[in-house]
Amino acid sequence: MQPLKIYNTLTRQKDLFEPLSPPFVGLYVCGPTVYNNVHLGNVRTFLAFDTLYRYLTHIGYKVRYVRNITDVGHLVGDGDEGESKIDRMAKLEKVEPMEIVQRYTNDFHDVMLQFNAIPPNIEPTATGHLIEQIEAAQTLIGKGLAYESNGSVYFNIEAYNQQGGNYGKLSGRILDDLLNETRNLDGQAEKRNPLDFALWKKAAPEHIMQWNSPWGRGFPGWHLECTCMSTKYLGTQFDIHGGGMDLKFPHHECEIAQGTGINGASPARYWMHANMLTVNGQKMSKSLGNSFLPHELFAGSHPLLEQPYSPMTTRFFMLQSQYRSTLDFSNDALRAAQKGYKRLINGLRAANSMQYIPSEENTGGAVLSVSTPGVVADEKKKADIEKSVQGIYDALNDDLNTAVAIANLFNLLKYVNMIYMNQLPPAALGADSFGKLKEVFVGVIENVLGLREEPTQGMAVVEGMLAQYRQFKAAQQYDKVDEVRRCFKDQGLVIRDMKHRIDWAYEE
RNA sequence: GGUCCUGUGGCCGAGUGGCUAGGCUCAGCUCUGCAAAAGCUGCUACAGCGGUUCGAAUCCGCUCGGGACCUCCA
């Protein structure tokens, strides 16, 4: 097993990842609130954890990956007051709240699929776990960690800390500071302490989504669902909990308090937070009006976009930075990413078609490479490949540093291209290095980074047109040759005209 | 105001105190019907000032700039 280090927000350092019961790993990621389309910033977080899931699986762990759908309880505006986001949309559009939920859940799934994200093993919803949430609130009341007030139930932070809890340990906040800085919000009278947060909220009559509870009609508080669902599917203690940086406080802090209060132990051992996607240096968010929807990106239809960018270009773009760094969005950066992605994916096609040819063997009319009698092993290149392969795993083990992993991948790409272009006989690398080159290059791109080819429409007739091209070429009918080239170009493809063979590639 | 992060070459973006990250762009070369691609070569940066050190982009201090969270947000 690879020695993976993960930056743990709890300890503020990179900790060696040691699962509670290897080879099994429990991974919980906070999913979206489905009241609206996911934007690109949301996507970044989910792709970061998709990559983590992929890597954990790649290195041999059996991962149970749980990512929830928040379909109730998330309020608009400040704190524990205000309308439910989903309720509001439902009223606005005069439809059932569950229609809103369904629509944006579908959208979310579509989008993630386009980005080639692997669906989680379990995708629980908050409304599907109301019983658990009510029970959790009751348990907390029973332990003196929560209280009922006017039909709502609040978590008692003071009591929690008196019982040995440490509210603020995740986000590095000090309770007294929080108390001093808390703004005076309306309707806080129900709470004993402004920091107390809702486990269950009494529903106003006009609130559509409401259920019976021991405290009357109401709905669950936002933070409670994650505690209940992670506990149910991963146990009272599990390995990794992930989410966006902006959920660190208060959401995850509350989860820890709830989990600790109910089960007597801090829920997750490793807390991971993905950083924000920024536009011109500012966090991408709906309220700032600088967020892109994925389909706007794919179509290039947003005013800030100079051209369309494909899902894989975008995925590659995001992977070129480390998940804990902010990543700034710009057309220049996306364009550069597009070129890099195409180059890498052309290399992927090349690598997939590569076959090892021992130096003694005469391949007789070889398609992939000429026979290479008497080739001497190139120890320098072999060592360089070895170094880059190790570099990839070292990088991924270092808190999923995909940027450095990709840098090493480009080093390998050089050798893939040299073989593909017949500039380097495979035999010069020896079977072992060659095998490793191909296996790691392909495996990391496809399985860990989740990058794949984006076929174009004209793909079906490519081989036929290529055959024509060869004929025209042989007949030296260059005007026809150029015509075929134009056809390819119209499809976003290009012809690779090499000495030893003719192939097509994605236009870079 | 509090807590924290951050400032790298034309652009993006990694960097554990000493050894070329990488991508994109640009220039040249080889190859080529012409191209394209590929390979090779060139372009050596760390906001400013001071300190620690044999040695700092990397540690410390100050100054200036940017950002996040503190209120819903991935």
Image (cartoon, rainbow, N blue to C red):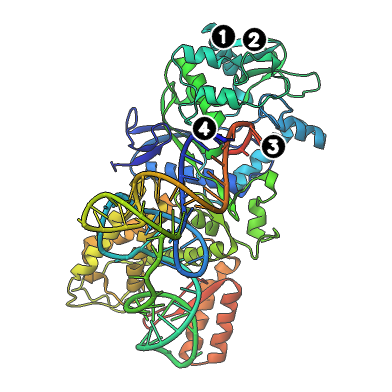
Residue A227 can be seen, yes or no: no
Residue designated by label 3: A35
Q: Marks 1 and 3, how far apart in space?
A: 31 Å
Looking at the image, residue A48 lies above or below residue A405:
above
Name the kind of residue labelled 2 in the image.
Glu
Front residue of A267 and A253: A253
Could you say which disc has been placed on residue A348 in the image?
none
**Circles 3 and 2 on the same chain:** yes
Question: Does A338 sit above or below residue B36?
Answer: above
Residue for badge 1: A141
Asked which secondary structure carries label 2, the reply is strand
Q: Nearer the viewer, mark 3 or mark 2?
A: 2
Q: Nearer the viewer, mark 4 or mark 3?
A: 3
Q: Earlier in the sequence, mark 2 or mark 1?
A: 1
Measured from the top left, where is residue A414 in percent x and y? 35, 69
Specify the quadrant that holds the N terminus of chain A: top left
Q: Which residue is mark 2?
A: A148
Q: Are marks 4 and 1 on the same chain?
A: yes
Residues at marks 4 and 1 touching, judged by CB atoms closer than 8 Å: no
How far is mark 4 from mark 1, CA to CA? 29 Å
- From the viewer's perspective, tell me whether residue A422 is left or right of residue A449: left
Q: Quadrant of residue A363?
A: bottom left
Residue assigned mark 4: A122
Residue at 52% across, 41% down: A119
Residue A435 percent location from the top left of the image? 27, 60
